[in-house]
Amino acid sequence: MARVTTYMGFTIPHLLRSACRLCPAHSALVALRHSASCYCTANGTIQSKRKMDHLERTANNFRQEVISQAKVCGITNESETVKRLRLAITNKDFTFKAGQWVDFFIPGVSVIGGFSMCSSPGLLEREGVLELAVKYTDHPPAHWIHTECTLDSEVALRVGGDFFFDPQPGDTPVKLVLIAGGVGINPLFSILLHVADLHGYQESKGNGYKMGTVKLYYSAKNTSELLFKKNILGLMSAFPGKITCRFHVTQQSSPICEELQPHVTEGRISEKDLEKHVSKDTLWYICGPPPMIESISELLYNSGVPRNCVFFEKWW
């Protein structure tokens, strides 16, 4: 029988502890890098590798030490293939930054999932909940979410990741360009919601971080696969000129609804779309399939964008 370690009444396979022990020593170094890179962490050169599991792939990433129980308190269908979970968090010390992910521990499932938050840190602070949007695959954690997960199901979560946007009051204002492909929208939607919170706080309190403009480019096969589109349209309406979005569809076969038509382009995100946003005070966040990240990051570098202004998270 495998050895196990219990956290707050939740049982986790002992083999995970060997991976966890590496994290505290690494976290101090990561914290220094975060300070040096001004609240963001840039990724290095992308390399093609064999497909690894979540723990192996993220072994060198920052991880919090806090592991919290969580209870599923909401399940909705975000699309035909994507379920959106709302999770109530037990541990009051559990926090995350917009763009990060969680290790997702499921009782009785030996494989550990890794899913980016699609909600803002502010929602966790206000209501004690976070949200994940998970696409159906045969990977055991995703398969469990789509076939076995129900209201009141209990899991455990641990936050990790070096891809985030977390400006502090007094930091120099920046503009953001967010570029998403498919379910790579998840961490970028979290960042977008965080930006909305920052704008809202600035408008109501007159202080805090003064956020620049944000442009989201979001590409999917068709409009039915554009996640959070109604929420995104709502943010554009709530913050006109401050938050804008262009949806791109590459295989649209049905008519585009009237509400979306003004915001949709048929075809891929192009150099012409992006080059007009190149400036010294713009940061670029990209999340999607690795080939998309490689193509767009190279395009940006060739357009004169410094590498330390481009941040990416691979979607697998």
Image (cartoon, grey):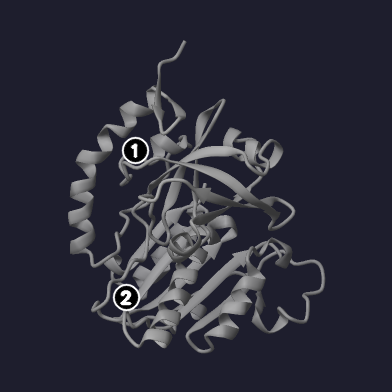
Q: Quadrant of residue 230?
A: bottom right
Residue underneath mark 2: 304
- Residue 194 position, x and y percent, is 44, 70
Q: Residue at x 40, y 39 (%)?
A: 57
Q: Residue at x 35, y 42 (%)?
A: 66
Element at label 2: loop
Say which mark, if any, is on residue 291.
Answer: none
Element at label 1: loop
Is 152 left or right of 168, judged from the image as shown? right
- Camera-near label (1 vs 2) is 1
- Residue 212 position, x and y percent, is 38, 83
Q: Relative to 158, does residue 140 appear above or below in the rendering?
A: above
Q: Residue at x 30, y 54 (%)?
A: 44
Is 176 left or right of 21, judged from the image as shown? right
Q: Give the amino acid at mark 1.
A: Ala
Labels 1 and 2 touching (C-beta < 8 A): no
Find the residue positioned furthest to the right.
254
Residue underneath mark 1: 59
- Residue 198 position, x and y percent, is 40, 77
Determine if residue 269 is in view.
Answer: no
- Residue 91 position, x and y percent, is 41, 46
Q: For the residues marked 1 and 2, what is the alpha-carbon distance in whole angstroms?
A: 32 Å
Q: Quadrant of residue 106?
A: top right
10 Å crowding of disc 1: few (<14), some (14-19), many (20+): some
